[in-house]
Image: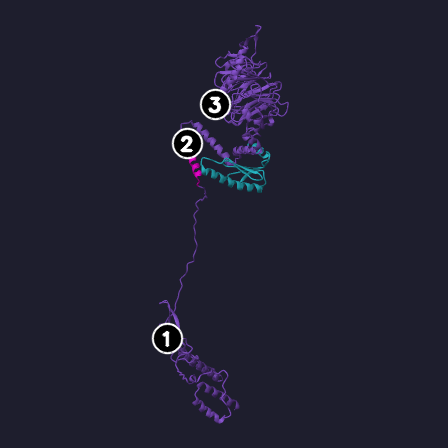
Chain colours: A purple, B cyan
């Protein structure tokens, strides 16, 4: 009780302070004071300090039905107006307590179901009770009771699903067994084809078409029936061969190119020298020149043979023919004809062998695939380079009139030892070599008046000849005795003129390629002589200290010529530079015992080829000093061409001629 | 004649190997070992086709004569034919 009274006091003191009404407080205070007189008013420390006026203020309190917890300003986004709109009415209902009841309305579906369920439960209970009660009694009675009881619940149980009496009846037909039957046709033969359509494929197709058309046109021309059959047979044969296997022989052309490429790589520096090297030191050498050795051509089967003839091919400037035989007349063996190209220094392009040594050869100007060859045994033959056989296409025999003696020089004409100049004509239709005598300088015709008045019978043995480049019928013949005869094709038994040229056999004669009148001759008597054919004495004489094997004019200058001697040296002369001496004397072959036999200038390139008696052919390049062209004079144009060359030589000859004329003879 | 030429090429100074390839790029003759041959044949065949196509595209009347590839170590030379390809590998002596 003490506790409760103290609480009450606290309450009342609070009340007093809040209301601030003295009357009420005094009333209360008075009431309190009666039974709690000793107590005084206590102000709590945190009481709000208010003024008197404020204490007297009246506060009204209104009771409303608003839910203080409900929000007052709900704003909702309206999609229609696309703005936020305040909602005017806010639900003020506050639910303090909710409880879900479990009472069901009697007439609703649920109620009826429940009723039904309850009643059946009750019935089953009754039945079970009755069963238990009747257990002791008769079983029948129980069953009867069961039976009685059962039907009445049944009508309640039965659900009427449908208004009509729905009975389902179904029947099934027999399903026929299914069988798969398929039929497939043979697939049409398919082939994969792919190709590119390039510009060049189209071009190839057109070219093929053209060729086919041309062939068909040719076939249309009336031809022998037999020929056609032969062609067909040939055609069949060739196709059968091709279809057999990969025919590797078709690579031969590619192999040839490849060999040349391989050689080019190996001899690369030589090829570069050949093409581009010009000896710069020639400027310091006065007028002397040099010969730069380039390639060396050799073939093992010709090691024991001597080079007896060299000739450049008139059409292919890098191809040259070399004839092999022997100058040793005691020992004669077989001969060979090889054609080399500068593009392949290691192996000859064409190889032909023969039983007799070759003494001379020449290549036809118009048909550069025909090589005419003269043999030691007097036969002549023509080799056709286009045909692959290693035998000559035409060969003379005793029947067709071969020469009695070695054939020394060949041009399209043949000259034999006893000065019988034959013109061999190749009769194409009959495939025979038929000769016609051009000139027959017999023993009788060459009588000469010796100084003592004796009639000397000179036996003419021709060793070399040369046809004039421009004058068709004029030609020179050099003999073993050292005489040179000027002859004409028109006169078959007489010669026009004779020159007492040398003391020994004339090894070579050659007309100057530019000047009409000048020719050169060389002999084993160590001399080289230059002549004007109208004058009996030579213009220039050079002594080379050794038997001269061959001499040749250069194709680019009328004053340059080269001579080779048996001591292995090559001499190059340029008359416009130095009239008395060679401007180049060089040992060309390696071993001392090697004799040089022939020299030839290349018609286009600044090279010479030199053959020796060991079967080697060396190619040398002429240094610039050897190829001097006339210098340009100030103000004058450089004239090029044969006229310049002729004039050059003429000038020189005039210098020589006058003194010779004055000397008298 | 062809056999001799090929033998000469193979015996030449610096030649490492020779391969003959047919039109389909299959090597039919070689002096190198199998794997190297197959590699060279396949690659060079394609390159040659491409080179030939290039040359002919520029001018259909023109055709490729040979192809040379110079590398640091050696030079590969290819000479194409209508149906075949001849490949030679050489060490150019320098």
Gap in Å between the C-alphas at discs 2 and 1?
109 Å
Crowd around label 2: few <14 · some 14–19 · many ≥20 (10 Å): few
Asked if labels 1 and 2 touch by Cβ distance under 8 angstroms, the answer is no
Quadrant housing residue A169: bottom left
Residue hosting label 3:
A641
Q: Chain of mark 1?
A: A
Asked if labels 1 and 3 touch by Cβ distance under 8 angstroms, the answer is no
Magenta segment boundaries in residue numbering: A197-210
Task: Say which label, 2 or 3, has the lower sequence index.
Answer: 2
Residue A75, image x, y percentages = 39, 71
Quadrant housing residue A333: top right
**Residues beneath discs 2 and 1 located on the same chain:** yes
Crowd around label 1: few <14 · some 14–19 · many ≥20 (10 Å): few
Residue hosting label 1:
A89
Residue A161 versus residue A268: which sits nearer the camera?
A268
Mark 2 or mark 3, which is nearer to you? 3
Gap in Å between the C-alphas at discs 2 and 3?
45 Å
Task: Say which label, 3 or 1, has the lower sequence index.
Answer: 1
Please tell me whether mark 1 sits on a helix, a strand or a loop.
loop
Rendered image: mark on residue A544: none
Residue hosting label 2:
A214
**Residue A146, placed above or below residue A561:** below
Task: Say which label, 2 or 1, has the lower sequence index.
Answer: 1
Residue A374, image x, y percentages = 55, 20
Residue A342, image x, y percentages = 55, 29
């Amino acid at each position: 009780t003490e506790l409760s009274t103290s609480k009450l006091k606290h309450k009342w003191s609070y009340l007093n302070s809040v209301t601030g009404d003295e009357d009420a407080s005094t009333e209360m205070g008075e009431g309190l004071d009666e039974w709690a007189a000793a107590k005084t008013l206590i102000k709590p420390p945190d009481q709000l300090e208010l003024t008197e006026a404020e204490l007297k203020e009246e506060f009204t309190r209104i009771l409303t039905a608003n839910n203080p917890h409900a929000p007052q300003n709900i704003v909702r986004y309206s999609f229609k107006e696309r703005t936020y709109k305040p909602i005017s009415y806010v639900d003020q209902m506050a639910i303090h307590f909710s409880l879900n009841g479990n009472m069901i309305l009697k007439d609703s579906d649920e109620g009826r179901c429940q009723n039904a369920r309850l009643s059946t439960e009750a019935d089953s209970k009754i039945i079970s009770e009755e069963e238990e009660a009747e257990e002791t009694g008769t079983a029948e009675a129980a069953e009867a009771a069961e039976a009685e009881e059962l039907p009445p619940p049944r009508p309640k149980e039965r659900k009427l699903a449908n208004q009509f009496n729905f009975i389902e009846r179904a029947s099934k037909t027999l399903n026929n067994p299914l069988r798969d039957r398929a039929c497939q046709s043979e697939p049409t033969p398919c082939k994969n084809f792919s190709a590119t359509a390039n510009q060049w494929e189209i071009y190839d197709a057109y070219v093929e078409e053209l060729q086919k058309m041309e062939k068909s046109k040719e076939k249309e021309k009336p031809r022998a029936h037999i020929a056609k059959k032969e062609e067909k047979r040939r055609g069949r044969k060739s196709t059968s061969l091709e279809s057999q296997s990969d025919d590797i022989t078709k690579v031969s052309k590619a192999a040839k190119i490849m060999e040349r490429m391989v050689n080019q790589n190996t001899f690369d520096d030589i090829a570069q020298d050949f093409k581009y090297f010009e000896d710069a030191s020639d400027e310091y050498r006065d007028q002397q020149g040099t010969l730069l050795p380039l390639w060396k051509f050799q073939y093992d089967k010709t090691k024991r043979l001597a080079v007896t003839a060299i000739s450049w091919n008139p059409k292919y400037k890098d191809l040259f023919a070399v004839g092999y035989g022997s100058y040793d007349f005691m020992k004669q063996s077989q001969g060979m004809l090889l054609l080399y190209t500068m593009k392949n220094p290691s192996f000859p392009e064409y190889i032909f062998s023969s039983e007799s040594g070759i003494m001379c050869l020449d290549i036809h100007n118009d048909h550069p695939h025909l090589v005419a060859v003269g043999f030691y045994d007097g036969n002549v033959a023509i080799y056709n380079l286009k045909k692959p056989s290693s035998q000559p296409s035409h060969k003379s025999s005793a029947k067709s009139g071969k020469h009695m003696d070695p054939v020394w020089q060949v041009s399209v004409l043949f000259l034999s030892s006893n000065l019988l100049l034959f013109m061999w004509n190749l009769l194409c239709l009959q495939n025979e070599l038929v000769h016609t005598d051009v000139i027959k300088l017999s023993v009788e015709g060459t009588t000469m008046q010796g100084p003592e008045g004796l009639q000397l019978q000179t036996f003419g043995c021709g060793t070399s000849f040369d046809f004039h480049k421009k004058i068709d019928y004029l030609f020179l013949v050099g003999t073993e005795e050292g005489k040179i005869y000027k002859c004409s094709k028109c006169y078959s038994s007489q010669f026009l003129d004779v020159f007492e040229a040398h003391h020994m056999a004339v090894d070579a004669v050659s007309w100057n390629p530019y000047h009409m009148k000048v020719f050169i001759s060389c002999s084993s008597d160590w001399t080289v002589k230059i002549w004007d054919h109208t004058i009996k004495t030579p213009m220039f004489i050079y002594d080379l200290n050794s038997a001269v094997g061959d001499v040749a004019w250069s194709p680019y200058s009328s004053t340059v010529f080269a001579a080779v001697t048996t001591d292995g040296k090559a001499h190059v002369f340029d008359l416009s530079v130095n009239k008395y001496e060679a401007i180049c004397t060089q040992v060309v072959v390696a071993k001392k015992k090697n004799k040089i036999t022939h020299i030839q200038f290349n018609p286009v390139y600044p090279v010479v080829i030199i053959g020796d008696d060991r079967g080697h052919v060396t190619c040398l390049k002429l240094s610039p000093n050897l190829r001097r062209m006339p210098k340009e004079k100030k103000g004058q144009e450089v004239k090029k061409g044969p006229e310049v060359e002729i004039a050059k030589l003429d000038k020189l000859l005039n210098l020589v001629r006058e003194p010779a004329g004055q000397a008298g003879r | 004649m062809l056999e001799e030429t090929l033998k000469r090429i193979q015996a030449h100074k610096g030649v490492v190997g020779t391969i003959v390839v047919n039109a389909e790029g299959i090597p039919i003759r070689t002096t190198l070992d199998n794997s190297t041959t197959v590699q060279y044949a396949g690659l060079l065949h394609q390159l040659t086709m491409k080179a030939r196509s290039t040359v002919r595209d520029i001018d259909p009347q023109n055709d490729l004569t040979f192809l040379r590839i110079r590398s640091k170590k050696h030079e590969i030379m290819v000479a194409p034919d209508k149906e075949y390809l001849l490949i030679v590998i050489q060490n150019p002596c320098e």
